Structures are given as C-alpha cells and as structure tokens.
Image (spheres, coloured by chain):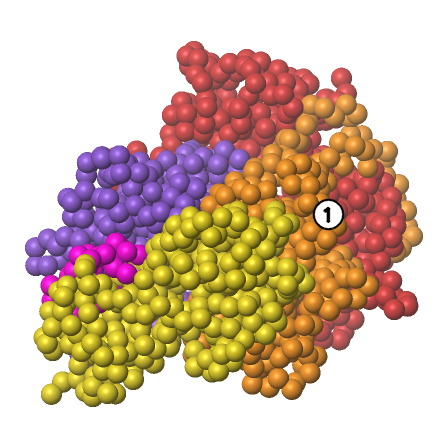
C-alpha cells in the first residue's frame, strides 16, 4: 500500500491523532505518559472498548442499540443483588450469569427488531426506558454498596495475570473475539452484507433477520458482562449506573469510522475511537482543565472527528476524464470447458 | 397515441379495516383507555383545573415535538434539542444579569435556539454527515458550553414580568403555554398536510435524491428545518426558563429522548416519509395523561419509564402484528 | 432433457396477481427467452426460481423431482444462479467478497476449519475474472468500479458457482454494445457447457440472435412457448401485448425550428470537457456512448444537479445560469433521469404526488394544496402515457418498472418544458411501452419541444434522432446527421476510434 | 376524619440518605396517628422533575409538602402556587429560598459542616500537606455553600500548613468521581487528602485510594453514609467522616409540617414548634430551623450505624 493510500485509512489518521493528543497532554503533564498512568487509562477505557465493539456489530447492520447502558445497569444490579444475598456463590457463576442476563435483554431487542420489524432506534429507545425502570423495580430503588458485595465479586477484575488485570484480559478476549468473528466467520461477513445492501443480502440468501437478532444478542451479552465489570469496578450498583453512557459508546464507534449508514467499520477503528475518548476523559483532570470544559471538549472533538472523516470520505467523482486507455479488452474466446 | 387504455380510478375504495388501523384512531382509543383507567384509579384525575395544570408538564416538550416531527419526516433526527434549551437558557440568564428587559430576553432565547439549530443544519448539509452523528456531537458541545459559562453557579435574577410566559393563565384557567402549543400544532399541521411545503417535506423524507432531481432544494429544506427546530427549542427554553425562573446547566436533561418518544409514538416513521401532526398531537396527550395519572398515584418517574417504554414498543408492535394476522 | 420444470405457479402481491398458473421448462444446453410486457411477471418468476419469493401455488421440479426453496441459499445449492434485474451488490466490499457473499469458502481443515479462507477466495475470484478476460483486481472495493465493470462482477458472481441453470433478467439493459457482445459469448459458452439459460430481455434482436426457445407471459399468465425458429417477431409481439404493433421506430420528422438550447464549452474538472451543441425546436438530438462516457454527467450539469466548472447555456437566445434543478425547470429544461428507483420515482408516494412534484406550486396555484386540481393533472398526463394502474393514488412502488418509467415521463411533461432530456428512457421497458414512448417523442417534437435522447441502445439512437452526438471518455468524439450515421461509424466513435 | 397527608419530595429516589429521612417521617407519623407519609422524587436530580411532582401533589391536595430542593429558586413558582392553595411547604436539607416555603429545616449549620470537614481532614493528614475537594455537580447549592464554608475555615491560622489545591467535580456519578480522583493523584503526586462532601463522591474516592494502593498515603473524608462507608473505614482509606442524622431530620420535619397544618404554629421567626422526642425546636430568622452538629463516624461506631442507614 502506498503512502497516500495509507494516509487515507481512517485507522491511521486516528492513530496519528491519538499520538498527537498524547504528546500534547504529555507536554503539559509528563506524568500522564508513565506506563502506570497509561495502564490506568487503558483499564479505565476497557469497558468502553468492549461496549463499542458490541455496538459496532449492531451499527454494521444499519441498527443502533440505545439500550446498552440500561442493559448494563440492570445486569449490574442483578449480579450485585446476587452477590449481596448469595455471597457464597463462586465468581464463575457471576461471570456466566452476567452475559446471559444481558443476552436475554438483547434478545428482546433483537426479536422485536428482526421479526416484528420495528425500527431499531424505536425498540431500543423503548427498552432504554424500560430496562432502566426495571432496575428500580428490582431493587426497590435501593443501592448496593461496597461492603455488601462479596470479596471475590469486587476483587476478580483487579486480579492480575502477567501484570495485566483481569479486566483488561477480558476486554482483550472480547475485542479479539469480535475481530475474529467479523473477519473470519461467514456470519460475521454477512453482517457487512446486511448493512451494506439488505436487498442484495437477501438475494444471496443471507438470513437478515437472523443476523439482526444475533447482533442485538451479542451487544446485549457484552453489555451484560460490562454491567458486572462496571459495578465491580466502582463498587456500587444503583438505578442511575452509567446513565446516558450509550451515547458515549456510539460516539466511540462514530469517531472510529463506523458508518451509521451500515456496512462499514472495523474493530481496530472502534478501539481507537474508544481510546481517543478514554484518553480525553482521563487527560483533562490531569492537565487541570476545568471539569466544566470536559463536556464541551468531547462534543467538539466528536464533531471534528466526523467532519475530518467525512472529508476523507468525500467522493471524488468518477474521474471519467482521467482515464486514458480506451476500454477495449481483448476479444473473448468461446471456451467450452465447464466453469469451475 | 396507440395503446390500450386501462380504467384507472381516482382513488382507492376505503375499507373499514383501513380506518380502524389508522394510527390516529388507535391512539385515540388508547387515549380513551388511559383516561378511563386513570379516572377510575384516582379521584383527583378528572378535575378541570388539575387536567389543565398537568399540561405544564408537557407543553414545552410537545412544542418541540412538532418541529421534531418535520425533522423525522425528512429522515433526520435531532438529539441536541435539550442541550439547545440549556444553551439558550444560559444566554438568556447572562442577558438578564446584564439587566436586559423581557422582550430582549425572549429575543435572545429565540435567537440562540435559531443559531444553534442553524449550526446543526449547516454542519449536516455542508459536510453531508448523518444528522444523528452531528447532533450527538452538538448535544455535548451545546450543553458543554452551558457548563463552561455557568460552572457551579445558577442564574436566578430574571425580571419580574418574565415569568408571564411560563406561568400565566389565559381565559378559563388555560395555561398560556398550552394555548401556544395548540396554536403551533394547528400551524404545523396545516403546513405539513395542506401546503406544497409539506408535500416537499414528505418527498424529501421518502427519497431525498429523487426529490433533488425534482427541483426541490433538499439541503436548503433540511437546513431550514434544523434551524426551525432550534428555534422551537429556543422557544421551549423561554417557556421553561420563565416557568422555573432559574437557569442551570443541567436544565431539561434527557428531554431529547422524551421528545423523540412523543414523535415516534405519534406514528411518525423513524425511516422518514410518513407520519402526521395529528398523530403526534394525540400521542402528546396519551403520554401526558398517562404520566399524570401515574404521578397522581405517586408512581416514581423511573417506574413510569417502564410504562412509557413498553407503551412505545407495544403501540408499534401490536398494529404490525394485527396486520400480519389479517393478511393470513 | 428437461432439467427444470415449473407448473401451475401463482403468486399474488397485495392488490396484484403477479403470476397466475404459469408453466415453464428449461432444457440443458439451451437458451430460453422469457418475454412479456412490463409487469407481466418475469422478474417475479425469477425471484421464485431463486428462492427469494415463495409461490402461493404451483410446483417446481428439478430433474423431475419437486423442490421447495426455503431460502435463496437452497436455490443456489440446487444449481440455480441469477443475474438480477436490479444491480444487487455491496459497494463497500471487495470484488472477491461480492462474488462470494453468502457462500464464502472456508479453510475446511484444522481447528480453524470454519474460518473464511481469504486466500482461496481471492484465487477463485481471479480465476473467474480471468475466464471473463477482464482485468479487475479481486481486492478492489466495488465502489471504485465503473458501472460496466460492476455488471461484469455481477455476471462473474453468477458464473462463479458451478450452476446448471443461469438466469439473466435483462442483463443487457445497462450495457453498451460492446459489452453486450461479450455477454453473448458468455451465453454461448454456457450453452456449450450444457447449462440451461433463462434469458429475459425486451430487445428482440438479441433474443433472435441467442435464444433457442421462447416463452411468453402476459399479465402474469402463460400465453405460449415454442422454438425460436418457428416464430416471427411480430407474432411474439402480438402474443405479448395481445395486438399488433406495426412500426418499430415511428420517426416523425418535423422541420427543425429556431434554436432553443445552446450549450457552449460545458466542462467539469473530472467528468466531461468542452461539451457544445445546439438544439432546435422539433429536433431530437441523440447522445450515444458507452456506459460511463459522461453523458448523464453532462446532462445532469445542464440540469443543475452538479456544478460545471465553465461553459455557457442559452435558452432561446438568453443566457441562463443554472445553479440547481429548480433553475433548470424554471428555464424550461426537464430531465428524466436514468435511475428510476433512486433518482426518479418517490416510490412510496402516489402516482399523483409524483407527477405533480416538480411544479407542485404551479399546479395548486399557490402554497395550499388542492387535491382535485392535482388529480386532474395526474389523470391527464397519466392517461396520455397509458399508465397501467388501479387508481391514481396508488403508490408508484406497486407499479412495474415500465409503468414507473411512464409515470416519470408524465411527471416531466407536466412541467411544460421547452427542452426535455430523456436519459435512457426505454431502459428495461417492454415493446409496447417502448413504442408508446417513441411515438410520444414524435408527438413531443410535433408540439414544438426539443428533445435530447441519451441512450445506449444503438437502434433507438439511429432510429429516433435527427442528429447524433457520440461521447467518449467525457468528450464529444463525433457528430452525425441522421442521414450519415451508420451503426459502424457510431460504434467506432463511441469506442474511441476515428 | 380524613388523614393528614404529608409528602416528602426528595432530590432523587434511590438515595439511602433520603430513605432514612422517610423512616424518620414514618416514625413521627406513627406517633401522631392519622398521618400518611407520601414519599416521592424524580428519577434524576433535576428541578423540572420536582416541579412535575409538585403539580401532581397539588392535584392530590396533600396537606403539606416537605422538599429537599434540587434548585433553590426554580421551585419557587410551583411551591408558591401550592401555598396559595393552602398547602404547607417546608424544605429540609437542601433549601428553597425563603419566599418559596414556610420553614427550612437545616440538618446542621453550613458553617459547622464546613468546619467539621476541615477539622477531620486536618486530623487525618496530620495538619499539613496538600488536599483537594471532590464535589458533586457543580450546580448544587448546598455543596457550594459547604465548600465556601470550608475555605472560610481554612483561613484559621491553625490550618496554615494545609493547602487546598483544587476542586474537582464528579457529578455524583461513581465512574466520573472515580476518574476525577485518579486524575487528582496524577496531577498532585504529593496529595495527602481528599474531602468529598457528597455521599457518592466519598465512596468513589475511597475506592480509588484503595484500588491504587494509596491507603496510608492519601486520606479521604467528607460527608457519607455509614452503610456505604463501612468498607472504606475498615480498609483504612478513611479515618473518619461525618453526617447528620437523617432519621431525626425526617422526624423533625414531619412534626413541623404537622403543626403547620394543624395551625398550632404559624412558622414565623421566634415560634417554638413542639417536635415530639426532639423537644421544642425554635424557628430562627428567615424561617430556618437548625438541628445539631454533624455526627462523626469512625472505626469505633461505623459498623453499628451501617445497619441503620
Ligand atoms: N413486492 C411487490 N409488491 C407488490 N407488487 C409487486 C411486487 N413485485 C412485483 N409486483 C407487481 O407484480 C407484477 C409483476 O412484476 P414483475 O416485476 O415481475 O414484472 P416484469 O415482467 O419483470 O416487468 P419489467 O419488464 O417491467 O421488469 C407487477 O404488476 C408489479 O407491480
Ligand atoms: N464508477 C461508478 N460508480 C458508481 N456509479 C457510477 C459509476 N459510473 C457511473 N455511475 C453512475 O452511472 C451514471 C452514468 O454516468 P455517466 O455520466 O458516467 O455515464 P453515461 O455516459 O451517462 O452512461 P449511461 O447513461 O450509459 O449510464 C451516473 O449517474 C452514475 O450515478
Ligand atoms: Mg422485471
Ligand atoms: Mg447515463
């Protein structure tokens, strides 16, 4: 790939932007660039990265999942209550149950979207409210706090293996799994087809409904897992956990170059988009920008990123005039052998 | 001309099922049920003054739902409306601190909304970026600016007469806000359903490319609609600020989703090109009356959101399922 | 030997009986022509054969055994592939993936046996493309290809699978003369390899050139079938439309009047350059070229869709600036675009609303809608073009391709233009409607309009135009008067020769 | 005879502090008999949400509304209307400005609260070094008042060696508060303490200190709930923290509201309101009733109170 083509790849542009951002923050506060600090940033962003991967699969099929944050909070509350009332249960149960609960919530979205054929934004807008309300009903509005959790519940994500926390390992596995799924499985590839051109996808026999259902389940399962991780990380479960976080997740995807029109997006782009937001969120307090600026700056950055993206996307026309060779291919021979 | 001619009727014969499956009819039935259930469950519900007062709870959102309807009909969406309210309210507050009078305050509120909406529209049409993406960005940006300006302070120094817009009643104890909503609903309904402008809006929503090839300045329409939507948010900011008499950066938090819920429940397709103002109008009351009834029973807002979410999905799913069954 | 047989197949859509007790049979090593007017049900039949739609009744037999296609994948496995009427491709994916989507090759061995085998996929793509003797890299993203190349990929996709039955639904409608020749060769190749080909086309010349047998549908019903040698063109047409059509290109020559449109040096940085021509009252000016020659681009610039970098446009001697389509409409230019579904019709809206859209203010005499006036106008122009519909409030989406095109022409005639640009007006239209459109062009020029006809169909250009302009790679290559234009000279110019 | 209905309108639901307030209210209701407590609050802590609820309470013609306000001024038009219709409005905890209520029940005095926290910080970090404040949303009145009071208290020469380096805002969200705390550690490597006058912030800050293995180096103090802070105290991240007794607060507020309804007092400055087991409380200038000094919790008593609230 030549240099200009390389420069046109969104991932490369983002990588450069992130490097610049790090350099700028590092210049103001060198402490931010220490490995320990960068590790913290990564740990802090891990949940966002996983959620962004799940969200990307959904957006690939021209969908959107606005209910991730509510799903996360609900699942988080379920696991928290479980930990509170059954502290004896091994952590493996929580680890299995969290994605399962999330999966079920996602499956409700998926079924309504794929088979009842309600637009994704409507369904997930509805479940965004409904799941959030269910937390309140489930918990009676009470929160579960630090000392009420069982030790393993809180400690597991912080355990480290080869110097990397379990939380990061989980994120790594989820994101790598997603990348393999999207690039190397037929189903993963069909997601691109479903989003790129649903009609054409139907014509080649791809079960659109199946794909839609699948992505919401997947996004739901990831949200569920993240629900446990989130609650465990901050050691508190209450109704408002991760309130409004769905938009951050979507923003990460958008910055990472996932097209909301469907069919375009990569796990690497998504991860970079998430990191970008994560670094900003973590850097502002460090470089002592007034916290009041944080929201405005993220908004500004999102706008800049999408405008830059749209510029590099802009179609350069068909360039009819530039073609110099007349399109006269050699005459075709009639060859009788069977097509393979 | 050659040709064998076909007999082509002017319009389709309407079937009874068509009427009963019309969205507005379904919503009216739903509204009836809501009113009935509420009046059964709460002795305070069917009270003239209570009902009128309850309109304070949704009038501002309903006004924004009107222009949001147009935006969604043209296949766009605006997630930044609530943030525009915050921004407009902040600028009004600053002006009030500087001693501006009531007319100037209103003007500033409307102008801020207008400009913010224009900024949305300009970015969307100039760079051809999907509206949902741009307005996610401006949603943070606008509210972020409000935080930057206000920080940890609140502005409460509004002139005395300013409270009129959000707190006054007209004849028969009807709140001014509500009357304004009714008037605007009539205007929007007329424009969307009985004018050529409305026709063009539907054309854009159904097929923006073909609309452009038909001589409709699509991007200009979208720009104008986003600006209008901003203006309506500015108006809502005037009403809300006047009603609560104070400005904080977190004002109207989360309203964007409530407004969109009203529109979608009103039968406006999120894919653009279809939906009516009358549907949205009824949906406003369905939601308003339902939440009012629930609040009379002191059901917490967060539990209401379960009702709203389920209602939203069910109201759309049920007709689809019925149609599917009828087709069998 | 019969490898595919259909009997008693029926299919209804809400309000339309698209197929009614249809039968069809295909034999190995032969080309079956399926003909019928627009809306006769041809594409619906294709969709049933490829498992996209399920028939309401009837039976499909393959090798004498009944089959039931639950999904397109079943049909594909049964050895049926199709080039569909609509281009159904994935613009953001590579050529290789476009060809293999839905049935990616997998590694097949080891722990990763379910993984997509990208290497094999590329290699296979290269092989298929090489067989078609085209030079396209398997890794190219489809978006970067020209229209013709995309079509080739579509054909490659159908051929990539070892299928026994290949269906081609109007494959030549968007191709230029040259590529049509290539396609004929591929059909011959398939035939020789013992495949059965079902070929759908509205162009009789090609049917007589390549088909062995024919089947006619009319209004969703089976009308007849037979061997191509035993039938004449007229007989086929009569069966299709239920009556005789005598003239193919009813050229009406009216004296060319004063110049209404004058274009001088219209240019664009990347798409076309130095387009100049004059157009007089009553003239039909044909624009010929290969697909992607820049004709549509130039016309769209004239119509204000794209902004030219330089050049002048004069209408009736007065210079005008066209910044957007509404300027062009006001100046009296109408443009019927080539892409019906995307640029032309607003599918979910009614026939009436479509027809009145470009001039909705004028029709209603103000900003307030007057349904009666609108419907009267729609009826007037709809009937003039013999649109087949059940009522004028019917959504255009429910019409067949040909009838959609008629609605579009009606829409633009209703603007009362001085110049009408018809971009591929008969693409994918059946003979009956085509004749109607051609005849109509005669009426237009008689009534004093000037017509620009952009077409990739050589007989149409030669038969209808007073003057012909041939474009090649964005520039005007040659101009012909009607009398001096021959097929050879025009094609030579279009392919870049002298 | 009809029940006397007193509504507790809190900042937002799902907050243990307010749940405890309600329990106090219920206790008083039981003592008084014939009193019904309605416990309501918006989903998220906004003034608009509270106004909607005031409208519905007005429609239900409750006898009194006790409010912990999300905005000092924004509720005034609504509460004024309520008072016009004969509903007694009192505010507690977070005040409504005086024209919008009859009585404000302050759990403690702002000055005391500020002083208390600075004092606890000084104890924890040995009277010298850098510390920071982690507040909730930048818009909350009581937070800002307390911070102002802290700054005032710091002027006392005995705190001369203590340096307030910055104020961060965690928006009363756990994740944001946590992140802000991490940011503080990075920006101020010499940081020795964090005061968080909000129950969510203090938990998040203590968690961050524990997670970063900074126990013993950085101390967290401020206002928190014993049940939520138990773990932090046991881990050593927090030596002591304070809070007033929400049960007493709810109890007193109910008693005051009841007396207003019955007309036994008007609620003007100088009035003495009988308040059951709390004895008589005195209405101060501006209609403010002040309760006691905040109560301090540490290792010795946190476990016991954690069971209560
Ligand atoms: N999805 C659909 N819903 C409703 N009606 C349909 C649908 N698809 C096709 N039809 C109708 O079925 C009939 C047959 O259409 P079909 O597309 O098979 O015709 P065709 O012979 O391919 O015509 P053309 O030559 O114009 O392509 C038409 O009247 C058409 O309007
Ligand atoms: N490489 C391409 N990618 C996508 N669309 C293309 C491409 N080339 C052509 N088109 C589409 O096809 C249409 C043809 O445009 P163009 O002006 O290049 O050719 P033309 O000479 O008019 O050919 P024709 O009318 O035969 O299609 C354009 O409107 C454009 O939308
Ligand atoms: Mg067809
Ligand atoms: Mg063209």
Q: Which chain is orange?
A: A
| Farthest residue, direction front | D158
Front residue (pair A268, C467): A268
The residue nearer to you, when weighing C298 against B115, is B115
Colour in which the image shows chain B: purple
Q: Report if residue C65 lies within the magenta region.
A: no
Task: Read off the residue under disc 1.
Answer: A34
Q: Which chain is tinted yellow? A: D
Residue stretch rendered in magenta on the structure? D71-100
Image coords of residue C19 (percent x, y): 56, 64
Q: Is residue B12 above or below residue B76?
A: below
> What is the letter of the red chain?
C
Report whether D196 appears left or right of A272. Answer: left
Q: Count the marks: how many?
A: 1
Most distant residue in the left direction: B171
Residue placed at 41% from the left, 45% from the top? B151
Residue B284, position in %: x, y?
A: 29, 61
**Image x and y of residue A118, in percent:** 48, 64
One can see residue D210 in this view: yes
Residue at 85% across, 35% down: A331
Q: Mark 1 vs ligand 2: CB under 8 Å? A: no
Which residue lies at the image location 64% right of the left edge and 73% below the top edge? Answer: A154
Classify the position of the N terminus of chain B by image quarter.
top left
């Amino acid at each position: 790939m030549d240099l200009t083509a390389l420069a046109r790849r969104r991932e490369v542009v983002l990588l450069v932007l992130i490097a610049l951002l790090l350099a700028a923050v590092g210049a103001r506060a060198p402490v931010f660039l220490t490995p320990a600090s960068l590790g913290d940033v990564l740990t802090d962003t891990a949940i966002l990265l996983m959620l962004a991967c799940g969200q990307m699969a959904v957006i690939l099929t021209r969908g959107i999942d606005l209910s991730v944050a509510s799903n996360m909070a609900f699942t988080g509350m379920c696991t928290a209550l479980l930990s509170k009332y059954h502290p004896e249960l091994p952590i493996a149960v929580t680890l299995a149950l969290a994605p399962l609960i999330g999966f079920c919530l996602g499956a409700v979205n998926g079924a309504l979207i794929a088979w009842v054929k309600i637009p994704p934004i409507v369904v997930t807008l509805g479940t965004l409210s409904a799941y959030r309300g269910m937390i309140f009903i489930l918990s009676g509005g009470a929160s579960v706090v630090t000392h009420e959790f069982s030790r393993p519940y809180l400690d597991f994500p912080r355990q480290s293996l080869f110097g990397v926390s379990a939380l990061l390992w989980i994120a790594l596995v989820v994101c790598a799994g997603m990348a393999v799924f999207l690039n190397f499985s037929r189903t993963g590839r069909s997601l691109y087809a479903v989003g790129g051109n649903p009609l054409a996808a139907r014509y080649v026999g791809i079960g659109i409904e199946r794909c839609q259902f699948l992505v919401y389940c997947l996004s739901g399962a990831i949200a569920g897992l993240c629900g446990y991780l989130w609650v465990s990380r901050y050691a508190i479960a209450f109704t408002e956990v991760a309130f409004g976080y769905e938009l951050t997740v979507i923003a990460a995807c958008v910055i990472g170059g996932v097209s909301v029109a469907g069919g375009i997006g990569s796990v690497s782009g998504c991860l970079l988009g998430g990191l970008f937001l994560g670094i900003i969120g973590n850097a502002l307090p460090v470089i002592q920008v007034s916290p009041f600026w944080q929201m405005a700056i993220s908004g500004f950055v999102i706008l800049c990123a999408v405008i830059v993206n749209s510029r590099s996307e802009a179609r350069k026309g068909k360039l009819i005039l530039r073609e110099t060779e007349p399109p006269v291919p050699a005459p075709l021979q009639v060859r009788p052998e069977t097509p393979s | 001309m050659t040709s064998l001619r076909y007999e082509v009727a002017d319009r389709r014969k309407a079937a009874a099922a068509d009427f009963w499956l019309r969205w507005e009819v379904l919503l009216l039935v739903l509204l009836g049920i809501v009113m009935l259930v509420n009046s059964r469950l709460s002795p305070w519900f069917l009270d003239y003054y209570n009902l009128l007062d309850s309109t304070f709870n949704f009038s501002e959102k309903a006004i924004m739902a009107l222009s949001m309807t147009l935006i969604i009909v043209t296949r766009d969406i605006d997630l930044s409306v609530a943030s525009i309210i915050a921004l407009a309210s902040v600028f009004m507050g600053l002006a009030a601190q500087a001693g501006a009078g009531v007319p100037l305050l209103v003007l500033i509120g409307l102008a801020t909304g207008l400009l913010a909406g224009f900024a949305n529209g300009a970015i969307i049409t100039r760079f051809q970026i999907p509206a949902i993406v741009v307005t996610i960005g401006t949603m943070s940006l606008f509210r972020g600016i409000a935080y930057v300006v206000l920080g940890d302070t609140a502005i409460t120094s509004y002139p005395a007469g300013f409270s009129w817009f959000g707190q006054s009643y007209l004849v028969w104890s009807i709140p001014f806000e509500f009357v304004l909503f009714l008037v605007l609903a009539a205007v929007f309904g007329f424009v969307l359903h009985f004018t050529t402008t409305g026709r063009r809006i539907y054309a854009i929503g159904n097929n923006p490319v073909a609309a452009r090839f038909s001589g409709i300045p699509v991007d200009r329409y979208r720009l104008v609609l986003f600006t209008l939507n901003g203006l309506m948010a500015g108006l809502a900011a005037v009403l809300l600020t006047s009603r609560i008499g104070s400005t904080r950066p977190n004002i109207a938090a989360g309203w964007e989703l409530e407004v969109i819920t009203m529109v979608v429940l009103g039968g406006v397709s999120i894919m653009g090109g279809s939906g009516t103002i009358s549907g949205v109008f009824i949906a406003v009351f369905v939601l308003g009356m339902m939440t009012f009834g629930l609040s009379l029973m002191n059901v917490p807002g967060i539990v209401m959101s379960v009702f709203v979410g389920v209602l939203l999905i069910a109201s759309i799913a049920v007709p689809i399922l019925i149609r599917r069954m009828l087709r069998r | 030997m019969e490898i595919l047989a259909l009997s008693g197949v029926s299919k209804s859509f809400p309000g339309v009986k698209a197929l009614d007790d249809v039968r069809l049979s295909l034999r190995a090593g032969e080309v079956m022509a399926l003909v019928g007017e627009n809306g006769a049900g041809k594409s619906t039949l294709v969709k049933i054969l490829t498992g996209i739609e399920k028939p309401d009744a009837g039976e499909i037999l393959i090798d004498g055994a009944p089959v039931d296609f639950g999904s397109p994948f079943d049909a594909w496995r049964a050895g049926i592939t199709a080039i569909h009427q609509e281009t159904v491709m994935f613009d953001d994916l590579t050529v290789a993936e476009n060809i293999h989507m839905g049935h990616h090759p997998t590694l097949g061995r080891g722990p990763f046996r379910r993984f997509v085998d990208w290497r094999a996929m590329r290699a296979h793509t290269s092989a298929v493309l090489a067989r078609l003797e085209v030079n396209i890299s398997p890794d190219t993203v489809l978006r970067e290809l020209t229209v013709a190349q995309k079509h080739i990929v579509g054909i490659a996709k159908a051929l990539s699978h070892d299928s026994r039955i290949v269906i081609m639904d109007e494959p030549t409608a968007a191709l230029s003369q040259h590529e049509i020749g290539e396609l004929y060769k591929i059909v011959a190749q398939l035939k020789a390899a013992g495949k059965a080909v079902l070929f759908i086309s509205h162009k009789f010349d090609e049917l007589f050139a390549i088909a062995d047998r024919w089947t006619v549908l009319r209004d969703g019903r089976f009308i007849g079938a037979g061997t191509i040698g035993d039938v004449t063109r007229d007989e086929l047409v009569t069966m299709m439309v239920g009556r005789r059509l005598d003239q193919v290109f009813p050229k009406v020559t009216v004296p060319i009047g004063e110049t209404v449109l004058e274009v001088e040096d219209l240019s664009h940085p990347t798409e076309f350059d130095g387009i100049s021509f004059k157009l007089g009252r009553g003239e039909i000016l044909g624009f010929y070229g290969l697909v992607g020659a820049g004709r549509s681009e130039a016309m769209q610039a004239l119509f204000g869709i794209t902004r030219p970098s330089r050049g002048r446009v004069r209408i009736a001697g007065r210079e005008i600036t066209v910044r957007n389509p509404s300027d062009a409409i006001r100046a009296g230019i109408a443009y019927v675009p080539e892409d019906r579904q995307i640029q032309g019709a607003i599918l979910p809206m009614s026939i009436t609303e479509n027809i009145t859209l470009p001039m909705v203010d004028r029709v209603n005499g103000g900003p307030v809608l007057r349904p009666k006036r609108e419907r009267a106008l729609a009826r007037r122009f709809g009937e003039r073009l013999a649109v087949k519909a059940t009522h004028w409030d019917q959504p255009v989406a429910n019409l067949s391709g040909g009838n959609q095109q008629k609605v579009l022409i009606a829409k633009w005639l209703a603007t009362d233009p001085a110049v009408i640009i018809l971009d591929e007006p008969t693409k994918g239209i059946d003979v009956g409607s085509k004749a109607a459109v051609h005849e109509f062009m005669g009426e237009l020029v008689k009534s004093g309009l000037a017509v620009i006809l952009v077409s990739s169909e050589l007989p149409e250009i030669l038969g209808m135009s007073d003057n012909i302009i041939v474009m090649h790679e964005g520039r005007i290559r040659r101009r012909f008067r009607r009398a001096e234009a021959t097929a050879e000279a025009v094609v030579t110019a279009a392919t870049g020769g002298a | 005879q009809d029940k006397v209905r007193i509504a507790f309108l809190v900042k937002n639901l799902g907050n243990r502090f307010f749940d405890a307030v309600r329990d106090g209210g219920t206790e008083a209701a039981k003592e008084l008999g014939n009193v019904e407590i309605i416990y309501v609050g918006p989903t998220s802590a906004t003034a608009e949400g509270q106004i909607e609820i005031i409208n519905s309470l007005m429609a239900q013609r409750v006898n009194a509304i006790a409010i912990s306000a999300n905005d000092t001024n924004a509720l005034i038009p609504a509460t004024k209307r309520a008072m016009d219709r004969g509903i007694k409005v009192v505010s507690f905890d977070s005040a409504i400005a005086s024209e919008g209520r009859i009585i404000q029940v302050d759990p403690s005095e702002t000055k005391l609260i500020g002083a208390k926290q600075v004092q606890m910080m000084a104890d924890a970090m040995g009277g010298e070094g850098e510390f920071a404040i982690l507040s909730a949303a930048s818009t909350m009145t009581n937070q800002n008042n307390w911070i102002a009071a802290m700054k005032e208290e710091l002027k006392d020469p005995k705190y001369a060696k203590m340096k307030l380096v910055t104020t961060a805002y965690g928006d009363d969200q756990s994740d944001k508060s946590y992140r802000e705390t991490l940011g503080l550690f990075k920006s101020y490597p010499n940081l020795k303490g964090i005061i968080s006058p909000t129950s969510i912030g203090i938990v998040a800050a203590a968690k961050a200190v524990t997670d970063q293995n900074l126990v013993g180096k950085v101390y967290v103090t401020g206002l928190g709930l014993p049940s939520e802070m138990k773990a932090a105290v046991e881990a050593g991240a927090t030596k002591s923290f304070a809070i007033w007794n929400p049960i007493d607060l709810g109890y007193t507020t109910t008693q005051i509201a009841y007396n207003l309804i019955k007309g036994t007092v008007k609620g003007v400055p100088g009035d003495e309101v009988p308040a059951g087991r709390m004895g008589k409380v005195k209405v101060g200038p501006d209609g403010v009733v002040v309760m006691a000094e905040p109560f301090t919790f540490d290792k010795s008593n946190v476990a016991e109170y954690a069971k209560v609230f």
